[in-house]
Amino acid sequence: MSQGYQRSLPLLDDLNRFYWTSGKDGVLRMLRCQSCGHWQHPPRPVCPKCLGRKLEPDTLSGKGKVFSFTVNAKSWGPGLEVPYVIGIVMLDEQDGLQLTTNLRDVAPEDVKIGMPVEVFFEKDEDVWLPMFRPTMQAASA
Amino acid sequence: MSAPEVVISGIGQSAVGRKLPQSGLELTIDASLEAIADAGLTTQDIDGVATFPGFRPDMQPFSPVGSIDIKEALDLKLDWFCGALEGSAQLGAIINAYAAIKAGLARHVLCFRTVKEGSGGASWQESATARAERVRVGGEFQYIFPYDAISATNWLSLYAQRHFSLYGTTREQLGQIALTARRGAMDNPKALFRDPMTMDDYLSARMISSPLGLLDCDAPTDASTVIILSAADAAAGSPKPAIRIDSVGGGIHGRAGWDQADMPDMAAFDAGRMLWSRTDYKPEDVDLALLYDGFSFLAMTWLEALGFCGRGEGGAFVEGGHRIARDGALPLNPHGGQLSGGRTHGFGFVHEAVLQLRGEAGARQVAKNPQVAAVSNGGGPMAGAMLLVRD
């Protein structure tokens, strides 16, 4: 990133550290209820579906679809380069399992809701930020 | 003893503008004294105070004054007070006061919202980008800020884009909300932006975060707005017609994270359901709508959430702008809203609803003699709504 602007980073704690460092081996993980199988994100110490208290990080495919997106055109601070695409990706594993991300390797005008995307990670200090790009299969099809 | 009816007995508003010389507390005193006089009360009658969001030492332009500050300034004798960010958006303060009066904890509650954002330091992103050292965030925003989604424009654009995609909503439709606001502001001496605006002006304004452009966003201002709620029997001697709070709605049923909702669904729809479940009135009985427009898209959402049109039909409802014009079937934000009036942050809509229901809105008074007004505040996971009636 250019001089003068640095993105904010998450403050790591015992609940979220697994999530923000999961990309170390290139794999996306989220908490999963060991009783009913419900995926829980952001991490919380209880399953909202069955109230089970045993949740463990589990492996996701890293594939999903663009649920919504916006092309940010305004630079919010010196050195923040625009445009960039902010997306909400809904992961394939569960309806409503969604996260904010940046959509990369795609021209802003080509982003569409419903577009298949896959995770990759961008390391910044001690965190691996999940980023998404069009799935390779879709790109080559 | 049955719970009393609750009325708005008085309103007041300070000067509104950019870089006003008065402090937040001075603005609050101005608005409070005006409202107390408007209600025919004295400071010694006030036994409750409610404010949104309470004093914020970390974000003073956003909230420079707390409930205790006005208590001390005016030597109020309080039986009940609160200042809270969590709740039914900005209207949470008024809904809390309504509940306190219903419960018999207070008789006359002074509710206020004060902002000094017109003097700078308005936004999250300014604080996020102003520092030399790396910012680390916890809580909900740790999942959002690292992707440079640091403006509320970003958060709401994601809802708007999905609405556009699902329902075919267009920029031209959204633009009618901004144009309607500007036409109202031209007749509001306190409004921030009063020059005429055309659809070309709207469409050619620079994009901020698609599909929302500059004229879809409100602008920060300095202001204090005060709404006094009273038990109806205690306000019987008020000089002005009492405006009864017929029903309120708030709460949230869906997921509360800005990025976790089933977009474009918002808490507004939960507030709407609650509001109509507590009244005999129907959406078609409403004469006037004062709907939160911190972004144009939020006013469109509220039109749907309060049942003035079906889900996804907000674009068609405002098409051409006739329905929401001052002389239309459902006049919307005749004072210019926050889009053209400035971000008085929620309470400005209540203030205008009361002026209109009393027939005191001057050049911008809506054509019909309005008796029922819907008022709403908030967006995303925050929502509050009220139905106000002049009996």
Image (spheres, coloured by chain):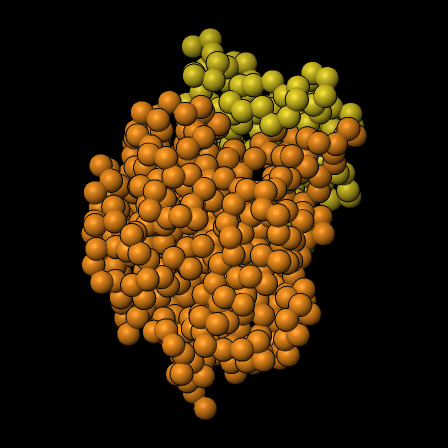
Give the chain coloured orange: B
Give the camera-side residue of A63 and A105.
A105
Residue B282 place in picture, x, y as percent: 25, 63
Residue B34 vertical position relative to residue B192 in the rendered view, above or below: below
Tell me where residue B295 sits by quadrant. Answer: top left
Residue B176 vertical position relative to residue B353 in the rendered view, above or below: above
Residue A67 place in picture, x, y as percent: 45, 32
Tell me where residue A6 sits by quadrant. Answer: top right
Give the camera-side residue of B65 and B286.
B65
Can the viewer see residue B290? yes
Q: Residue at x 32, y 50 (%)?
A: B334
**Looking at the rendering, in which quadrant would you find the N terminus of chain B?**
bottom left
Give the camera-side residue of B386 and B237.
B237
Can the viewer see residue B266? no
Q: Residue at x 22, y 63 (%)?
A: B369
Hue of chain A?
yellow
Residue A76 vertical position relative to residue B337 in the rendered view, above or below: above
